[in-house]
Image (cartoon, helix red, strand yellow):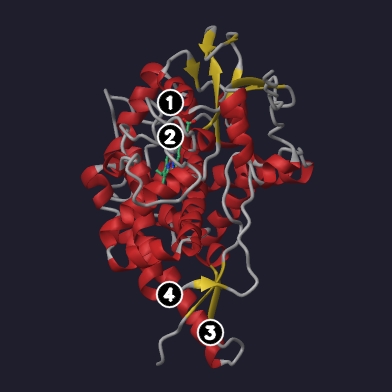
Amino acid sequence: MSQPTVVPSAPDILSPEFVADPYPFHRVLRDHHPATYHEATQSWLISRYADVAHAFRDPAFSSRNYDWQLEPIHGRTILQMEGKEHATHRSLLNPFFRGKGLEAFLPVITQNAAQLIGSTVERAAGDLIDGIAGRGRADLVADFTTWFPINVMVDMLGLPKSDHERFHRWYHSIMAHLNNLAGDPAITAQADQTREELRDYMLPIIRERRGGDGEDLLSRLCRAEVDGEQMTDEEIKAFVSLLLVAGGETTDKAIASMVRNLLDNPDQMAEVRADRSLVDAVIAETLRFTGPVHMIMRQTEAEVRIEDTTLPAGATCILMLAAANRDERHFANPDVFDIHRPDLDVAKAFSGAANHVQFILGRHFCVGSLLAREEMTVALNLVLDRLPNLRYQPGFTPQEAGLYTRSVPSLLVEFDIPAA
Ligand code: HEM
C-alpha cells in the first residue's frame, strides 16, 4: 500500500528560521501552499511565478495598500496611484529615467562610483603605508554600496555634495522604519523627525527651483508638465523621499549581492573580468537569484482566484518576488547562480517584457530599472578594475539579512594594492 503523502504545513514568514534562510521555505510555499493566509500579518502569501506575474498585471490587484504602508512616511507617491493619476505621473517621470534623459546623468553616476571606490583604495593604501594592514581591506557595504546610489540621487537632484551625509542619515532612518516589524517606538520617533526634517529642507528649495532654469532633476521635475498639469510641491517632496528608498536601498543591496555572488563563484568572476559583455548577464542573474526586493504588497479590489483558492475582495496580499524568481516551474535549477542560464532573457531583463519579476511587471514596473542597470554596471566595472584579486577577508562568511528587502549587511573583502 502506498503511504499517504505528508503535506508540510505553511511556514511562518516571521519565524527566525524563515528570516535566517527563506529559500527552502519558499519551495514549501510554492509546492504546497501557493496562496495561503498568514494570520500574523493578516495577508495572503502568493509565491508561484505565474501567479505573481499575473497579479501585477491584473487591475483586480491594486496598490492601495501603500495608503497605510508608506504614505505616513513619504506622503502620497506614485506607488499608490492608479488609473489616470498614475499614468500622468509616469509620463512626468519617464523622460528623466529613459533614453536621452538618463544619458544626461551618466557622468554623475560614473563620477560618484569612481570617487567612492577611489577613496576605498586610497584608504586601504593608507593602511598599507601605516603598516596597519598588509593588504587592502574594506567593508564594501559600509564603504561603498550604502553611499553610492544616495550620492548619485543627491547629485542628480542638484543638491549640494555637502548634504550627502544628511541624506545618508535620512535614508537609514526611513529604512529602519520600514523594517520596524517589532514596532520599536524610538525608530518610529526618529522616522517622524526625518519626515519633518526632509519636508523643512525640501519645500523652500522646490519653491526656488520652480522659477529657475536649472538642468538638474529637481528643477526639471518642478517645470515638467503633462496635459497642463505639474506636480505639486508636496508631490515632489514625497517623490524625493520615495527615491531614497526606491532608488537607494534597492540598488545598494543589489550591488552588494552582485559582488557577493561573484565572490562565491570565482569562475564566473574570472569570466566577466575577461569579457565585460557578460556584465548585463551578471546583473540580471543577480536580480533573479538574490534580488533585493523579496516581497511587495497589493490589495484585492474584487474576489480573485489563485490556483485552487478564492481570495475575498479587500484582502492584503504579499507577492513573494524572491520565491517567484526561484520557481522551478519557470527557471531550471533555480537555486544555482548561473550567468549563462538559457532561460533568463538578459536582453529584456531591464524592460517591462522581462521574464524575472524583480522590477515587477505591468503598470507599476520600476521607473528606475535602467538607472539601476547603469549604476550596477559602473560599480561592477570599477570593482573588477580597481580591486585586483578581490576575495573575502579570512574567516568572513557572508550572511544575508532582511525580510521584505534582503542582502548581506556587510561584505568584508581584501584586495591587492599595486606597488606605488
Ligand atoms: C536594483 C534596483 C531596483 C530594484 C530591484 C527596484 C524594484 C522596484 C520594484 C519591485 C518596484 C515596484 C513597487 C510596487 O509597485 O509596489 C519599483 C518601482 C519603482 N522604482 Fe524601482 N527598483 C530599483 C531601482 C530603482 C531606481 C534606481 C529608481 C530611481 C529612479 C527606482 C524608482 C522606482 C519608482 C519611482 C517606482 C514606482 C513606479 C510606479 O509605481 O509606477 N527604482 N522598483
Quadrant of residue 200 in the image?
Answer: top right
User: Can you give x and y, in whole percent of width and height, for residue 78 in the image?
Assistant: 44, 29
Q: Secondary structure at mark 3?
A: loop
- In the rendered structure, the answer to whether residue 74 lies left or right of residue 331 reads right
Name the N-terminal-most of marks 4 and 2: 2
Vertical relation: 210 (above or below) 339: above
Marks 2 & 1, CB-CB < 8 Å contact? yes
Please name the residue shown 45% across and 55% down the image.
149
Check residue 387 in the rendering and tell me which mark sits there, or answer none.
4
Residue at the disc numbered 2: 357
Name the N-terminal-most of marks 4 and 1: 1
Cβ of mark 1 under 8 Å from ligand 1: the answer is no
- Look at label 2 and name its amino acid: Val
Cβ of mark 4 under 8 Å from ligand 1: the answer is no
User: Can you give x and y, in whole percent of width and height, for residue 84 in the image?
Assistant: 36, 18
Please name the residue shown 62% across and 64% down the image.
397
User: Can you give x and y, in whole percent of width and height, for residue 271 in the image?
Assistant: 33, 64
Quadrant of residue 348 in the image?
Answer: top left
Residue at the disc numbered 1: 53
Q: Is residue 21 visible?
A: yes
Please name the residue shown 59% across and 92% down the image.
131
Q: Quadrant location of the C terminus? A: bottom left
Vertical relation: 68 (above or below) 222: above
Marks 4 & 1, CB-CB < 8 Å contact? no
Crowding around mark 3 (Cα neighbors within 10 Å: few <14, some 14 to 19, many 20+) is: some
Q: Secondary structure at mark 4?
A: loop
Q: CA distance from mark 4 to mark 1?
A: 38 Å
Crowding around mark 1 (Cα neighbors within 10 Å: few <14, some 14 to 19, many 20+) is: some
Marks 3 & 2, CB-CB < 8 Å contact? no
